[in-house]
């Protein structure tokens, strides 16, 4: 399974950040797969944002829950992230990640840099 993130590299506050993860080599409805978004701000560690499961169930980080929406497009086999009311603190490299806890597999996209600046 391969992942490719895409979206605007620059977002102005307090707009909404929107990213798409294109999935190839597998279906986003495959059993036991969780499609996650993770970010890494400059000079900081990884921060988990949330996931959408094969069933369509979503779960978000409590610290970002009020601003986050993860959705999917079954026709295009995409997973999308929307983060509203962004501030410069949302500047980060954003990664799309698949996880399969049934056998411990995981895979990462290459990541996409998003800068929040006016």
Image (cartoon, rainbow, N blue to C red):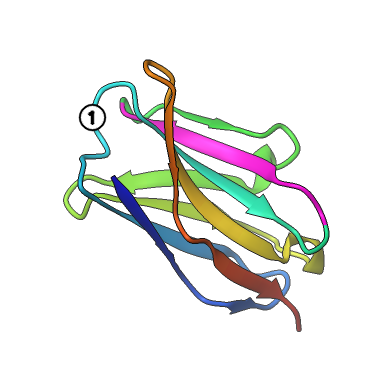
Which sits in the foreground, 57 or 24? 24
Q: Is residue 79 magenta?
A: no
Look at 68% across and 74% down and name the residue there: 115
Q: Quadrant of the N terminus?
A: top left
Which quadrant of the view contains residue 94? bottom right
Look at 33% across and 45% down and name the residue there: 72
**Looking at the image, can residue 99 be seen?**
no
- Above or below, 27 against 10 in this view is above
Q: Which residues are magenta?
A: 44-54
Which quadrant of the view contains residue 56? top left
- Above or below, 109 against 57 in this view is below
Q: Quadrant of the C terminus?
A: bottom right
> What SS does tag 1 mark?
loop
Q: Which residue is mark 1?
A: 30
In the drawing, does residue 73 fall left or right of residue 16?
left
Which sits in the foreground, 24 or 6? 24
Which quadrant of the view contains residue 107? top left
Look at 41% across and 60% down and name the residue there: 20
Outermost residue, left side: 75
In the drawing, does residue 12 fall left or right of residue 108?
right
Look at 59% across and 47% down and name the residue there: 38
């Amino acid at each position: 399974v391969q992942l490719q993130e895409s979206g605007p590299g620059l977002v102005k506050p307090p707009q909404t950040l929107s990213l798409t993860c294109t999935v190839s080599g597998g279906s986003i409805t495959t059993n036991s797969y969780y499609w996650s978004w993770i970010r890494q701000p400059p000079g900081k560690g990884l921060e988990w944002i949330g996931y959408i499961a094969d069933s369509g169930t979503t779960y978000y980080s409590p610290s970002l829950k009020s601003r986050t929406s993860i959705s999917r497009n079954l026709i295009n086999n995409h997973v999308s992230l929307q983060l509203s009311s962004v501030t410069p603190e949302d500047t980060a490299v954003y990664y799309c990640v698949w996880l399969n806890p049934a056998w411990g597999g995981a895979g990462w996209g290459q990541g996409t840099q998003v800068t929040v600046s006016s």
